[in-house]
Amino acid sequence: MQITFEGRRALVTGAAHGIGRAIATALAADGADVVAADILGSEVAALGETRGVRPVTCDLSKVESISSLVAANGPFDILVHSAGGVCGQVGRPLEEISENDWDAIVTINMKAAFFLAQAVAPAMKAKGQGRMVMISSGAGLGVSLTGIQAYASAKAGEIGLTRQLAHELGQFGITVNSVAPGFVRSNPTSERQWQSYGEEGQKALLSRIATRRLGRAEDIASAVLFLLSDQASWISGQTLSVDGGK
């Protein structure tokens, strides 16, 4: 059965590059009207050349910006929260972590996920259907390769939020799921992380993956599109690891 999103409007955050960009373009290719949001205005603007994609610059660390984004571009049938990451931070001992360091990562990963869901849910409830997918991380299920405490905590929180929202919203025909990617060289941060391992570290990481390769942004997008589709209408509250097998 072919997956199609004709007639559906999707909001994809973190769409300027990597996984978010792959999801936005894949949704548009399958017929969705996609609003691609990112704080990196000039980079996300390049998506304007893709048919079916409307780029929008938005600072998801501010709740009022989220509300304005949804009010100006909604209503939405689909939400994919892919924005997040480590906010330029690297692993350090917990004694060195400031409140601002902690808040920056938790805000864009977990807090934004909640307020995005809050903003799009009323229209989905009114329609009696909707799909939400949060891009979490293997770091939320185990130990983070980054060594960043806030990142591991925020991604675990995002997975917990997925379960909770699924139970609250399921009665309205809305499913909420999470995809937890393994290591994907999809943006400048993950590329720096990969290079920091050196040749031996890279070989060791690959040896722990059943398929013996790193993921691609398209691998994650394929899993997301399935969870957004009608074929996944009885799947909710789940976290799907897309990591090559570990």
Image (cartoon, grey):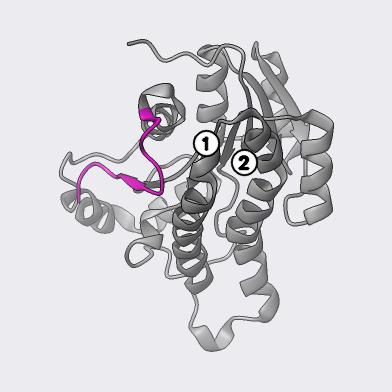
Relative depth, front residue between 196 and 4: 4
Residue 18 bears which disc, if any?
1
Residue shown at 60% from the left, 65% from the top? 106
> Mark number for residue 14?
2
- Classify 52 as above or below 211: above
Q: Nearer the viewer, residue 14 or 121?
A: 121
Residue 233, image x, y percentages = 40, 30
Residue 161, relative to residue 31: is it above or below?
below
At label 1, which amino acid type do we have? Answer: Gly
Q: Does the image show residue 133? A: no
Q: Which residues are magenta?
A: 232-246
Please tell me which residue is depicted at 58% across the width and 52% down the height of the picture: 84
Q: Is residue 135 left or right of residue 78?
A: left
SS label for mark 1 = helix
Marks 1 & 2, CB-CB < 8 Å contact: yes
Quadrant in which the N terminus appears:
top left
Disc 2 residue type (three-letter): Gly
Q: Is residue 244 magenta?
A: yes
- Residue 221: x percent and y percent? 43, 30
Q: Quadrant of residue 80?
A: top right
What secondary structure do most residues of the magenta stretch adopt?
loop
Q: Quadrant of residue 146?
A: bottom left
Tell which of 171 and 97 is nearer to you.
Answer: 171
For the point 70% across and 41% down, which residue is it? 122
Q: Residues within 10 Å of mark 1 (few under 14, many from 20)?
A: many
103 on left or right of 200? right
